[in-house]
């Protein structure tokens, strides 16, 4: 082992040797070399050894890239956006598993159409030395020749940014489903635009911390960056990568029909469920709760294996090992705690389904919230006294508690463990000494000045203020300002975790707590408070990741600014249209506490449940209320992180474990990871993570560097193309569903994985 430079590594050819041993390093400033290739361990390694620094200086913002980005923005808002949790794209917001989806599908479509444009649209060379030669400048404008990397990136980012408001638009879905309010299109579009553009204004101010440094990786973007470079950098290695990409893409495209439509048993194969078809009813209930996991809110999916890539996703080939290891600890805790809560009857859990995000009355029926709130969406105390308080399932109460634990832990972790890094980043930005080589390479382009972002902040602020004053929000103007201030404080903290670890902590719970305090008895006002606080945070994280992608691919900063603003404007319109289409077509399923294995209202149910319960904060979360421990979680979550920091000051390692590698907010977050939705893919996701981040990354770094992200992106792309087709063709995204005929792999009754002993296996 020896220290090597990035230039030396870029000249080396990787090998796939079988006998090399990996040396452990405590000094992370040095490169760890295995088989002549560096092992990718952190952001500095990604910057130096994984992403090519090449910049051909090709044009970025052209007529062609603008038109292609605009045309594909509709598809981007409906399907492909790389955005952070809690949800990632409009269709998947109504799915039983919330996944973060890459832009691979759009990327490939735009690549194909861009190359077709370059080939068949007339060029200036076609009219040279002819009587039409005077048209040459116009033809150059329309078709500048070869479709190159930066045009491709700009078109893709316009389309993907168009989906950036999809989490905000869910508030309008909640109003439509639970409050019988058809929010005016102008209100929805203006509110979504305000949320996204305010977030983007903050992004510009936080760039020195959230974008420029090497450690700000945004790991889920790496498959996309790798594909962009593979498609446009014409080298021998890239030809092999492109061949692997199209092979894997095609294979997954055709395979995805099986688990998602023809053979849904592949979503959750569980030997225990299949072997206990004739167990007693009481045993069947326990088996279903623990081992079931293929249908929405069926069970925890213990020892289930789900083979549907749309739910596994490339996240597990890109998330760093330290993140995944912490998440595995949380998932183990989740199995034990949720079963313990339910069967100990904590929070009266046995009166309700074990997993659900709906609100219930004390007798187990759906809570009649319409009767408790007046026509102006304010609390009717007389009706509340007659009907009683709403109740959460035990798993949902645990989820709310762990979100607060995670938020408290995240705030403490950022200040205690990453505080010195924050100060260092701003000092480097001020002095112009940021060491990241990609940041240095992009300095030849004019930076988007800070006052552009401030101007955007002001524009977004006044757009939102118009909505508050004129729309159906019930939110006071002063509460709107508090929401924006709260989002502005939390946004950089969330970015730190997401960029360094690959995923974040949903801050919605904190926003709902504050909303309940300042807007008691007003659930709709709480929805909008959350939109201008939590969704601003979500937007900041997503758009910061886009700016990082621009830095990796050397897109001029001013072009990035214009691209993302235009995409945001398009997305404000398109997301609303897509949401209305799905909600109108699947209203009954979305209101169901359980949903199906295709559609689920868990996201809207969760938003509504939080809005209603925090509107009743005094009754539910006060010291005399049933859920007092939930708000206390914010403070409780800070204590273990503070203790960990004290231990780390004394011992950097305990045995083989680095204390700093324990990220308690992630453990807290994943300890309720299975509290709703389809849980059968979890074990396969862990296996994919181990193969990619342990075996390939550490023992075969050459193959990992060249093919790991390409393969993950290809599998995502193939699955997403087929799911998009099936959603509208047979799943009923815009009309009636057309289910596949029943057979043993697609039972007509009971759970798909047979975990309820429905007898369907005997009759097939």
Image (spheres, rainbow, N blue to C red):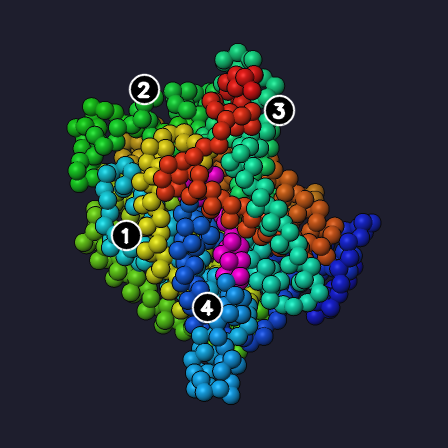
Single out the residue that lies furthest toward the top: 280
| Secondary structure under the numbered disc 3 in the rendered image | helix
Cα separation between marks 2 and 3 = 35 Å
| Residue that numbered label 4 is attached to | 65
- Specify the label residue 719 is tagged with: none
Q: Is residue 427 above or below residue 614?
A: below
Cα separation between marks 3 and 4: 51 Å
| Nearer to us: label 4 or label 1 | 4
Q: Position of residue 548 (x, y in %)?
A: 51, 63
- Above or below, 477 relative to 519: below
Mark 4 or mark 1: whose residue is earlier in sequence: 4
In the rendered image, the vertical position of residue 195 relative to residue 735, given as above or below: below
Taking the magenta stretch, the answer to whether it contains residue 99 is yes
- Asked if the residues shown at circle 3 and circle 1 are in contact, with their CB atoms under 8 angstroms apart, the answer is no
Q: Earlier in the sequence, mark 4 or mark 2?
A: 4
Residue marked by disc 3: 271
* Residue at x 37% of width, y 53% of height: 165
Q: CA distance from mark 4 to mark 1?
A: 28 Å
Residue neighbourhood size for the residue with mark 1, other residues' Cα within 10 Å, grouped as few (<14), some (14–19), many (≥20): many
The residue indicated by pointer 1 is 188
Precedes in sequence: disc 3 or disc 1: 1
Secondary structure beneath disc 4?
Answer: helix
Question: Which residue is painted at 40% across and 35% down in the image?
Answer: 737
Q: Give the labeled residue for mark 2.
A: 363
Nearest to the eye among marks 2 and 3: give it: 3
Q: Residue 322: where, in percent of width, then height?
A: 61, 47
For the residue pair 94 and 116, the one nearer the viewer reads as 116
Q: Position of residue 639 (x, y in %)?
A: 48, 42
Q: Which residues are magenta?
A: 92-112
Mark sitting earlier along the chain (2/3): 3
Label 4: few (<14), some or many (≥20) within 10 Å?
many
């Amino acid at each position: 082992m020896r220290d090597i430079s990035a230039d030396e590594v870029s000249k080396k050819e990787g090998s796939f040797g079988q006998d090399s041993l990996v040396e452990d390093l405590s000094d992370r400033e040095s490169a760890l070399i295995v088989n002549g290739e560096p092992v990718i361990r952190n952001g500095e390694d990604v910057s130096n050894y994984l992403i090519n620094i090449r910049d051909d200086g090709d044009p970025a913002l052209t007529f062609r890239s603008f038109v292609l980005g605009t045309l594909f923005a509709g598809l981007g808002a409906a399907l492909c956006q790389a955005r952070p949790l809690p949800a990632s794209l409009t269709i998947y917001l109504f799915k039983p598993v919330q996944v973060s989806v890459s832009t691979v599908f759009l990327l490939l479509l735009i690549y194909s159409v861009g190359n077709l444009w370059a080939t068949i649209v007339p060029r200036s060379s076609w009219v040279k030395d002819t009587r039409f030669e005077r048209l040459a400048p116009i033809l150059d404008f329309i078709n500048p020749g070869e479709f190159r990397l930066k045009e491709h990136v700009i078109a893709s980012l316009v389309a993907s940014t168009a989906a950036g408001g999809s989490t905000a638009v869910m508030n309008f879905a909640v109003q439509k489903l639970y409050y019988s309010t058809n929010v005016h299109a102008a209100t929805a579009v203006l509110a979504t635009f305000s949320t996204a553009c305010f977030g983007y204004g903050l992004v510009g101010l936080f760039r020195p911390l959230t974008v420029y440094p090497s450690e700000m990786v945004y790991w889920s973007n790496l498959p996309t960056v790798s594909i962009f470079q593979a498609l446009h950098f014409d080298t021998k290695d890239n030809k092999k990568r492109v061949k692997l990409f199209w092979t894997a893409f095609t294979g997954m495209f055709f395979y995805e029909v099986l688990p998602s439509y023809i053979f849904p048993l592949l979503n959750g194969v569980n030997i225990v469920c299949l072997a206990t078809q004739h167990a007693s009813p009481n045993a069947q209930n326990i088996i279903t709760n623990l081992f079931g996991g293929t249908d929405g809110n069926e069970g925890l999916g213990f020892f289930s294996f789900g083979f549907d890539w749309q739910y596994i996703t490339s996240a597990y080939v890109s998330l760093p090992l330290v993140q995944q290891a912490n998440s595995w600890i949380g998932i183990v805790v989740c199995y034990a705690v949720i079963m313990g809560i339910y069967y100990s009857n904590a929070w009266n859990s046995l009166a309700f389904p074990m997993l659900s995000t709906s609100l219930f009355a004390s007798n187990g029926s759906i809570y009649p919230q319409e009767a408790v709130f007046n026509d102006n969406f304010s609390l009717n105390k007389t009706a509340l006294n007659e009907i009683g308080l709403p109740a959460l399932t035990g798993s949902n109460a645990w989820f709310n508690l762990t979100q607060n634990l995670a938020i408290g832990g995240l705030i403490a972790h950022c200040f205690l463990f990453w505080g010195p890094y924050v100060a260092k980043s701003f000092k480097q930005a001020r002095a112009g000494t940021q060491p990241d080589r990609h940041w240095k390479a992009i300095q030849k382009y004019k930076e988007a000045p800070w006052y552009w972002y401030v101007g955007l902040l002001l524009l977004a602020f006044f757009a939102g203020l118009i909505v508050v004053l004129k729309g159906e929000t019930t939110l006071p103007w002063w509460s709107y300002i508090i929401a924006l201030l709260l989002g502005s404080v939390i946004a950089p903290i969330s970015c730190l975790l997401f960029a360094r670890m690959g995923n974040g902590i949903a801050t919605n719970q904190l926003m709902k707590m504050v909303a309940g305090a300042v807007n008691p008895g007003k659930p709709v006002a709480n929805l909008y408070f959350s939109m201008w606080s939590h969704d601003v945070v979500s937007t900041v994280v997503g758009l910061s990741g886009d700016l990082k992608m621009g830095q990796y691919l050397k897109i001029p900063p001013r072009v990035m600014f214009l691209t993302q603003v235009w995409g945001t404007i398009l997305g404000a319109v398109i997301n609303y249209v897509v949401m209305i289409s799905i909600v109108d077509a699947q209203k009954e399923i979305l209101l169901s506490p359980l949903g199906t294995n295709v559609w689920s209202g868990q996201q809207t149910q969760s938003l509504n449940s939080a809005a209603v319960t925090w509107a009743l904060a005094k009754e539910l979360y006060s010291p005399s209320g049933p859920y007092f421990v939930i708000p206390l979680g914010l403070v409780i979550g800070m204590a273990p992180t503070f203790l960990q920091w004290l231990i780390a000051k004394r011992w950097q390692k305990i045995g083989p474990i680095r204390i700093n590698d324990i990220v308690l907010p992630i453990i807290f977050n994943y300890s309720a990871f299975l509290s709703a939705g389809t849980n059968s893919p979890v074990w396969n996701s862990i296996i994919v993570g181990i193969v990619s981040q342990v075996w390939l990354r550490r023992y075969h770094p050459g193959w990992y560097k060249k093919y790991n992200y390409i393969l993950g992106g290809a599998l995502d792309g193939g699955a997403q193309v087929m799911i998009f087709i099936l959603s509208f063709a047979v799943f009923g995204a815009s009309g009636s569903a057309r289910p596949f005929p029943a057979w043993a792999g697609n039972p007509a009754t009971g759970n798909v994985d047979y975990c309820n002993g429905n007898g369907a296996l005997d009759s097939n």
